[in-house]
Amino acid sequence: MTDRQPQILVVDDMGNWRALLRTILESEGYAVYTAARFSEAMTLLQERTFHVAVLDVRLIDADPANIDGLYLRGKINTHWGKTRTIVVTGYGALAREYGVSGFFEKSAFDSQNFREAVAMAVEAAEREASAQQS
């Protein structure tokens, strides 16, 4: 993962949040890919390797079977274990209920803390990739 610009996936059904997160992350030098839907995110995950996935809890194509950002987080952890996940949500109580200990509330979003969390996640992903190559 260290041979190229860090790759970040942003999954949020709200266009204004996707745009904001893209702007913040691109200003930090990351290559950013965005998805508005679970299905779009799955396609991107199958096509690319990401250092970090930034996920919203509720997605526009979520269904009663809980196919949402938390379900996507589980898929990423199972199938793309090297990709770190960060949750940014307007549903903090729901995130806590499902055991997400570190997340960012949209209503109290702090861009500097978010930048730092992403940088730490990228570093962890690169360290893991480096250790596996050794």
Image: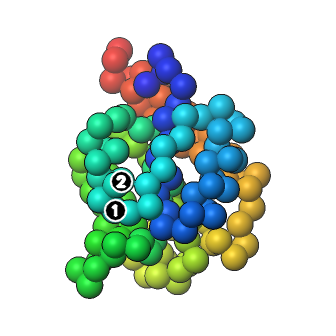
Residue at image mark 2:
41
Left or right of 82? Residue 108 is: right
* Secondary element at tag 1: helix
Spot occupied by residue 4 in the image (x, y as percentages of width and height):
50, 20
79 vs 47: above or below: below
Q: Residue at x 44, y 61 (%)?
A: 36
For label 2, the crowd category at 10 Å Cα-Cα, with few meaning under 14, some 14 to 19 and many 20 or more, is many
Q: Nearer the viewer, residue 134 or 46?
A: 46
Q: Residue at x 65, y 39 (%)?
A: 26
Q: Marks 1 and 2: CB-CB under 8 Å? A: yes
Q: Quadrant of residue 47?
A: top left
Type of amino acid at the residue the image marks with label 2:
Ala
Spot occupied by residue 19 in the image (x, y as percentages of width and height):
62, 55
* Secondary element at tag 2: helix
Residue at image mark 1:
38
Question: Which of the image's four quarters has the N terminus?
Answer: top left
Q: Nearer the viewer, residue 10 or 116?
A: 10
Q: Residue at x 61, y 63 (%)?
A: 17
Type of amino acid at the residue the image marks with label 1:
Phe
Spot occupied by residue 8 in the image (x, y as percentages of width and height):
50, 42
